[in-house]
Amino acid sequence: MDSASDDEPLPATGPLAGVRVLDLSSVIMGPLATQMLGDLGAEVVSVEAPNGDINRLMDAGPHPGLSGVTLNLLRNKRNISLDVKDPRGREALLRIAATCDVFVTNLRPGSLTRLGLTFDDVRAVRPDVVYCQAQGYPSDGPDADRPAYDDVIQAVSGLADSFALSSGTPRFAPTILADKVSALTIVYAVCAALFRRHRTGTAERIEVPMVDVMRSFMLVEHGSGAIPSPATGPVGYSRVLAENRRPFAAQDGWICVLPYSPGEWKAVLEIDGRGDVVASGMTESRQAIIEHANELYAVLAEVIATRSTSFWTAFCEEHGIPAGLVVPLDQITAELPEVDHPLSGAYHHIPDPVRFSGGSGGLRRPAPVRGQHTEEVLAEAGLTEVEIAELERSGVAVSVARRAR
């Protein structure tokens, strides 16, 4: 795969080419959303506080300020380091905002008000702005300014409770699911707002409360019998909550085998002489299979253990039964394409998972270090060399060029 050079970035070819995004967000949710917008071709300017973003320190990295997380999370962006709490930094930010189509932030409502960076403030300098405000809780509720991180949202959204419904103990998913699902929501909301602006020419304020995102996400299937009013059953989709629903140990490894129809269950069970289970009626219909999922998965675990993964892979392919080996994360990472970063050297690139017939954005810019484009972006926003130098001298703005001098 070709590597992008920061000095000579590749041209934007994705569906959002020509859209300019100002990213005033931190950690994962907001930066992941703007990474996706950048992958789609948008020009993204990320604004980072002078003390840096914690995502630059998440686990090991090959270069100071470029963690393994950051190398992909900050790709296709330019980065400026600016203290927006200082009135001079706020003014500089608004001058940049005036040049941008989209403004994304995960600052809480109270902070945005105190900083003078609300929708109305930004709309005053960019009348047709698409302004996306993502935080833990709705801005019109009593929890608007409560801090919220992924673990907290997993707890209050019902996600942690789904583990309790399955195994008796609340747990967190071993991935920052709330951050990532919310990032996807930001992206589709921004794209929809850009489409409406294209038709109407009007500004749009988008709000993405993480708790609302995750509650709606969880209730797709787990609202279940509690969705009708009055309820016809409990919350929770029983098949998914079955305690025995898991990958199964074959003789030489782990595999997921998912018989779905009565015929598929019959094929698997009879190969090991479990006609008694078929005769019991537990697999006679899809409804019966759902109702008896936990019992059936326990039997399936016993059956899978009698043969090798290669046997089950071939058997499932022959009978059209969904199946897949459990693939280790380190193997998946090792199989990613390698690209070169101008500072850190080779790293594994996580490809954009969406393919467009007209071309996707691709990797155009490597992840920047903090403040790498401060002077460049401020100059584009109309600040003079004297103004930029004064911001840097006072510590309101930080740039790589300045640190190198």
Image: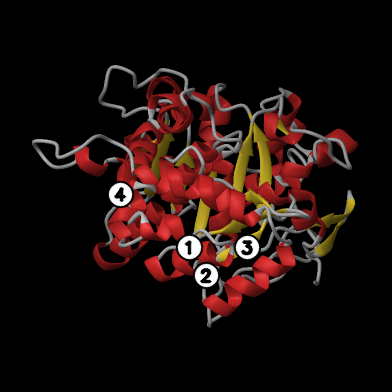
Could you tell whether 121 is left or right of 380 in the image? left
For the point 61% across and 44% down, which residue is it?
Answer: 46
- 229 above or below 382? above
Q: Residue 268 in the image: state x and y as whole percent.
A: 53, 65
- The residues tagged by marks 1 and 4 sit, at their Cα atoms, a distance apart of 46 Å
Amino acid carrying mark 3 in the image? Gly
Frontmost of labels 3 and 1 is 1
Q: Residue 359 in the image: state x and y as whole percent.
A: 58, 78
Sequence-wise first label, 4 or 2: 4
Amino acid carrying mark 4 in the image? Glu
The reply to whether callout 4 and callout 2 are in contact (CB within 8 Å) is no
In terms of secondary structure, where does tag 3 sit?
strand
The reply to whether callout 1 and callout 4 are in contact (CB within 8 Å) is no
Q: Which residue is mark 3?
A: 324
Amino acid carrying mark 1 in the image? Pro
- The residues tagged by marks 3 and 1 sit, at their Cα atoms, a distance apart of 12 Å
Mark 2 neighbour class, 10 Å CA radius: few under 14, some 14 to 19, many 20 or more:
many
Amino acid carrying mark 2 in the image? Ile
The image's mark for residue 403 is none
Q: Which residue is mark 2?
A: 321
- 212 above or below 325? above
